[in-house]
Amino acid sequence: MFALISARKGRTLGGVGALLVSSAMLVAGPVSAQGSDTGVDPETWTPEYVRSIAGQTEPNTAEECSQVVPLDYSGSVDYWYVGPNEASPELEHKMYDDFWAAWEETYPNIEVNAQNLGYNDMLNKLRTAALGNAAPGVARLPILWGSEFAAKGQLSELSPEDVGYKTENFWPGAMKSVTQNNKVWGIPTNNETMAFIWNAGIFEEAGLDPEKAPDTWAEVVEYSKQINEKTGKAGYGLVARVNAGNTPFRFMPMAWGEGGGALDEASDSPSYQEVWVNNDGTRRAVQNYYDMYVRDKSVPVSALTNTQTENQDPFLANQLAMVIAHPSEYATMLDRANKATGDDKAAAMQVVDNMRYGMIPRGEDRRAVVFGGSNVHIFNPDNVDGDLDMEAAKALVCFMTGPEWSTKLAWVSSNPGNTRGFETVWMKERLDTIKFLDVSTSMLPSGIPFPPVAESPEIMNIIIPEMLQNALTEKMTVEEAAADAEKKVNALLNGM
C-alpha cells in the first residue's frame, strides 16, 4: 500500500552544479578526468558536448532497482525532502507527481510517508528529530547539510554501490560532499550551478549594451549604480538574509572570485582547516556589497531580508535589472507572466522576452560559482523513530538516484547527479525545451563545493550572512565585520 503526504510548502530556492568529464570517459561509463576544483574537464565539458551525448539511452529504472530490492518487497519508510513549492513552475510539480506515480507502480507494496518541507524549516526540524531519535529513515538534503549529521554519527554509511550504481557515475565533487573520514554517507541526487540573469530592456534604458552582461564583479557594482542613476530602478538583486541558503549561494561566488572564501575550499588542495573569511579577497567581496547597498543605494533596500524569491516580483515588474538564479527562473517568470491579465500580462511578457542569461561574473582571482545540489541519506537506525526498514529505504534511494529520476526530478532547476542521466532521451528533451539550460551548464567547470565539514551550515547560513549584515547596517566596518566572522569561524571549528 502506498501512502504519500506531500504538502506544497514554501521553499526558498538556493541553489545548488553538475560536473562532467571527457567524452570518451562518459560514453564508456566511468567519470575520471578531473578539474582541480570541480571534477570536470573544462576543455571537454561544453554545452555542445552535452547536446552531442544526449538522447542515446532510455534506462529501465524498475529493472535496475529490482536487482537491489525485489519489486514485490513489502515494507515502509519515512522520507523528508525539500521539493517544489508555490513559487515553483508547474512543470516541477508535475515531475514530482509523475515520480510518485511511477514509484507506486514499481513498488506497490512499499509505503512511503513523505513530507515536503520548506528549505528554511527543514534543517532545524531534522536536527531536533535526529536528536530525539525520531528522524525519518531517508532524507534528501541540500548538499551543505549532510556533513553535519554524518559528523554526529546520525547517518548510516551509504554509497552508490549499496543501491546498484557505481561511484564513477557520480561527480567527484559531489562525492566529496558525502565523504568524511574515508567513509561515504550519501548519494548525490542532483547537481547544479547558477547563471547571471539580466533584463536587456533596463540595460538599454540605462545606456548599457543590452546583449552584454557585466564580466566582472567590479562591473556589476558599476552597472548597478548606472542603472539606478539613469532609471531609478534597482540594479542588482543583492541577497543578504540570515539563515537562508540563498545568501551564501550568491555571495560565495563573489568571495571566491575575488580570491577569498570561508575556509580554503577554493584552493586547489583544500584542507578545510585554513580560515579565509578575513583575507583580502573576502573583504573585497564584502566591500562590493557595501558599495552597492550603502554607498550607491543601487539595490533593493529590503536586501537584508530578501531571498531570490523576493526578487522575482520586482524583476517581473521591470524594476530590477540583474539577479543570480537557476535556469528555472525563466520558466518561473514565464509561468507567472502567463497568469497575469490585461496590461499587467503584456508588461510581464515583455520582461520575460528581455531576460538574458550569461556566465557568473569573475573577480580579480577567478570566475566561480557554487557547486550545489542535493544528496540523499539514510539515517542511523538508532536515530530513527521505530525500526528502520533498510530494504525499503534502499529501494527508494535506488529509484531516485538512477539516470531516469535523477534527470526528471531535476528537470527545471538542476542536472542529474547520476552522470548516466546526461545520455538519456530525457536529457535531450530538457535541452530542447528549457531555455538557457545550456548557459548554466557552461558554469560547471567553475563550480566550487562548500566545505564538507560539520560546521558548514552554521558558517554559510549564519556567520557569512551576519558578516554581511554587520557591514551593510554599518554596525561594523567591512574590516571589522570580516574580522568578527573570522573569530566566529575559528571558535566554531575549535568547539568553543
Image (tube, helix red, strand yellow):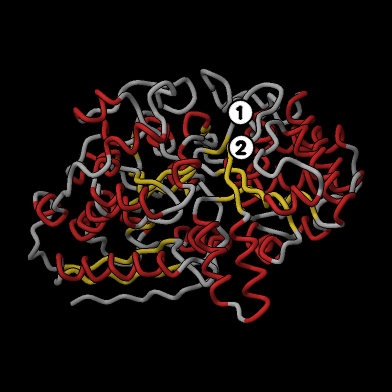
Q: Can residue 64 be seen by looking at this rendering? A: yes
Label 1 sits on residue: 367
In the picture, the quarter occupied by the C terminus is top right
Label 2 Cα crowd, 10 Å radius (few <14 / some 14-19 / many 20+): many
Residue 335, image x and y in percent? 52, 69
Secondary structure, mark 1, is loop
Cα separation, mark 2 vs mark 1, equals 7 Å
Whichever of callouts 2 and 1 sits on the residue coming sooner in the sequence is: 2
Q: In terms of depth relative to the viewer, which is nearer, 289 or 130?
A: 289
In the picture, the quarter occupied by the N terminus is bottom left
Residue at the (60%, 66%) spot, across then down: 349
> Pointer 2 and pointer 1: residues touching (CB < 8 Å)?
yes
Tally of numbered tags: 2
Label 1 Cα crowd, 10 Å radius (few <14 / some 14-19 / many 20+): many
Q: In terms of depth relative to the viewer, which is nearer, 225 or 245?
A: 225
Would residue 38 be found to the left or right of residue 102 on screen?
A: right
* Residue 132: mark in rendering: none
Q: In terms of depth relative to the viewer, which is nearer, 251 or 115?
A: 251
Give the amino acid at mark 2: Ile
Residue 371, image x and y in percent? 50, 38
Residue 15, image x and y in percent? 53, 49
Give the amino acid at mark 1: Arg
Q: Is residue 161 above or below residue 243?
A: above
Q: Is residue 231 above or below residue 17?
A: below
Label 2 sits on residue: 360
Residue at the (71%, 22%) spot, across then down: 364
Would residue 277 be found to the left or right of residue 293 on screen?
A: left
Residue sitting at the far bottom: 342
Q: In terms of depth relative to the viewer, which is nearer, 266 or 342?
A: 342
Residue at the (24%, 52%) spot, across then down: 404
Residue 479, image x and y in percent? 86, 32
Secondary structure, mark 2, is loop
